[in-house]
Amino acid sequence: MRRGPSAPVADGGHGPSALAPARARPDPFDPWRSSTGIDGYNREVFENEAGLLPELGIFGWLRFRQALVNALSPDRHPDEIEIHYMKRGHLRWWVRESAYDFSTGQVFVVLPGELHGSESGAIQPCEHYWLRLRLPAGNAALPLLTREQTREIIDGYRAITLRCFGVSPEVSEFFERLHEEHRAPAQMQSVLMGRAMLHALLITILRDHGTRCGRAVAKGFATWQVRRALEWLDAGYREPDLKIEEFAVRSGCSSTALRNRFKIETGYTPHEYVLHRRIEDARRELATTDRDITTIGYSLGFCSSQYFATVFRRHTGMPPSAYRIKHGGGGGTARRPGG
């Protein structure tokens, strides 16, 4: 991990949204500190002196191969717009009283002052970028933009109707380029290029949002083959031997082509989508019933209780028994997001 004037804040106790408050002294039990240097947890966070652009409160990247438990606490940022981009993986987050599935190829937007967090407090295996754009005070402008241009961007984000939505591949490229400039020596060229990438990123997301809204009104996001595949998977996702090859043959396309199209339009592979549906049902049953955990796993199509527990923990950051206790299952009162 790079250090120096433009090095990331690697051990500052900050998660993707800086949800864990900074501490005056190191906390040996802080999951962000305890995971530093451990195989499977890679991240870079640029803020304060390590930041490249003053208009960014934070810029970060992470790639986790296993869940980091107790990583996020509910938080809000009164004067910043927070934007996340999922390069690969899936997270389940909430904002205010609503929960969202944040998947590959999507952005997730949190507006100033909105309370937000992770449903289980964990970050599941994924790779994603995030930033927080500081709003200028009063009627001031963002650097190298006019007041009118600044207001156009800020008003555009305040007016979004989709919290989480798919974006074009250029968004990933802009995040990657912005990351590269943060890693480079802090020179004027890096600042200028980084700011150009930031402006392109912000505008592209707004345009993609407008496009997605138009598609939603016109015909939905999916092609007919993907829509049919979704209907088929929704009807049979609890079956233990479900195979996408069977549906592909009936649809007159190759299983590889269908998988690729499914991934592009939904953010999931068919297998990931099936697991997602199963885990969603498991969450609900664990939080609202007293059914035996092994019975729940088998009823959802898992071949063993051990495999069910492994998949559930990978998706939520905790075993089924702990999830049930936390969310009041087995006769208790389930907790609401942020509660």
Image: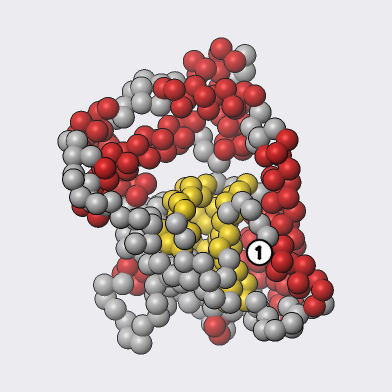
Q: Residue at x 17, y 36 (%)?
A: 292
Q: Residues within 10 Å of mark 1 (few under 14, many from 20)?
A: few
Location of residue 254 in the rendering, given as x and y in whole percent from the top left corner: 59, 19
Looking at the picture, tell me which residue is in the foreground, 159 or 28. Answer: 159
Above or below, comparing residue 293 to residue 181 in the picture: above
Q: Is residue 21 visible?
A: yes
Q: Residue at x 80, y 71 (%)?
A: 149
Looking at the picture, tell me which residue is in the foreground, 108 or 27. Answer: 108
On screen, residue 276 versus residue 139, left or right, reads left
Above or below, comparing residue 19 to residue 173 in the picture: below
For numbered disc 1, what is the local secondary structure?
helix
Above or below, comparing residue 173 to residue 296 in the picture: below
Label count reads: 1
- Which residue is label 1 attached to? 158
Q: Residue at x 62, y 18 (%)?
A: 253
Image quadrant where one finds the C terminus: bottom left
Q: Is residue 173 visible?
A: no
Location of residue 36 in the rendering, given as x and y in whole percent from the top left corner: 37, 69
Above or below, comparing residue 87 to residue 137 in the picture: above
On screen, residue 142 versus residue 64, left or right, reads right
Location of residue 321 in the rendering, given as x and y in whole percent from the top left corner: 20, 47
What amino acid is labelled 1 in the image? Arg
Colour treatment of the image: secondary structure
Location of residue 177 in the rendering, given as x and y in whole percent from the top left corner: 67, 63
- Can you tell which quarter of the image residue 265 is in? top right
- Can you tell which quarter of the image residue 299 is in? top left
